[in-house]
Amino acid sequence: MPLMVVGTIALDDLKTPAGDMKDLLGGSASHLSMSASLFTKVHLAGIVGKDFPKKHMALFKRKGINVDSIVHADGQTFHWYGEYRKEDLNTAITLKTELGVITSYVPKVTAAQWNIPQVFLANIDPETQMKFLQCMRKPQFVGADTMNLWINTMKESVLRLMKKVNLFVLNDGEARMLTGETNIVKAAKCLRAMGPSIIVIKKGEHGVFCYADKFMFGFPAFPVENVVDPTGAGDTFAGGLMGYLSKVNKVNEIHLRQAVIYATICSSFNVEGFGAAKTSSLTLKTVDARRKQFLKFMES
């Protein structure tokens, strides 16, 4: 089944121990769409400014991503300037953020997309996520992501959104922040009580934990030796997760386990290159080869 995605579409200027890069394709929806498009037809919604490079838009189209609901506005594209230091590649240091046209974004969906059954609300402010969800006509399955900024500044909106979604994805720090629970299992149970039937908690290099009423499970991360750029790893994970679930169009423990494994593998490729350099050229064959390595790794 096709997947409708909304979130940020951005430009990133980035410095890591591997080098300095400018005007990389960034944003939650961009990274998510790269991995989700391996499994299903992706329809992408967001906003870009007049400075958004044509090559990035061409990349979306080359990946088979529908861009009909991307708003093109006067002004500058949302731009993030960040840094990762050698001593802690897990933590992004924000040097500067230029919000640009994202402050005026009003979600739109073409009539042909109103009835798309699978929806993912990638990281953007929860009020925009809610407005976008209202554009869709009774979607069958809705996933959402959030971040610490929105939990700190718009917690009530995050809580309202959670009542509208089936799948909620966040990292372990955000889970503890939102629930006040330090134990990850207790935090997951608390999040489940807030609305979503499936909770997926990302733990970075320590893997992932998944919780639902009738089951819970966890997987390690794929061991990556050379981390180049961690930006978008969580969004890439969410894309692999939701993309696979959209493909099989059935959510149960068996399919969810497979989806989390595929999401883990997609994320492992993301960190090996700047921006979308690795995920934009990924094929399902390459992903499946690493997936087999991962399964052997877990058996050993």
Image (tube, grey):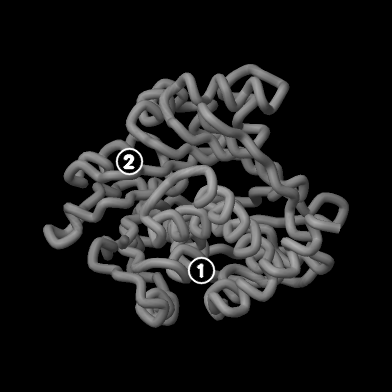
- Residue matched to label 2: 128
Report the front residue among 67 and 2.
2
Measured as percent of width and height from the top left, residue 232 is found at 58, 57
Report the front residue among 242 and 153.
242
Amino acid at circle 2:
Thr
Element carrying mark 1 = strand
Residue 168 numbered tag: none
Residue 25 numbered tag: 1
Height in image: 209 above or below 243? above
10 Å neighbourhood of mark 2: few (<14), some, or many (≥20)?
A: some
Element carrying mark 2 = helix
Amino acid at circle 1:
Leu
Measured as percent of width and height from the top left, residue 78 is found at 44, 56
Measured as percent of width and height from the top left, residue 155 is found at 46, 24
Distance from label 1 to label 2 (Cα)? Answer: 21 Å
Tell me the quarter of the picture where residue 285 sits: bottom right
- Residue at 58% across / 49% down in the picture? 257
Q: Is residue 293 left or right of residue 198?
A: right
Measured as percent of width and height from the top left, residue 193 is found at 48, 19
From where the camera sits, is residue 288 visible?
yes
Mark toward the start of the polypeptide (1 vs 2): 1
Height in image: 164 above or below 106? above
Height in image: 165 above or below 78? above
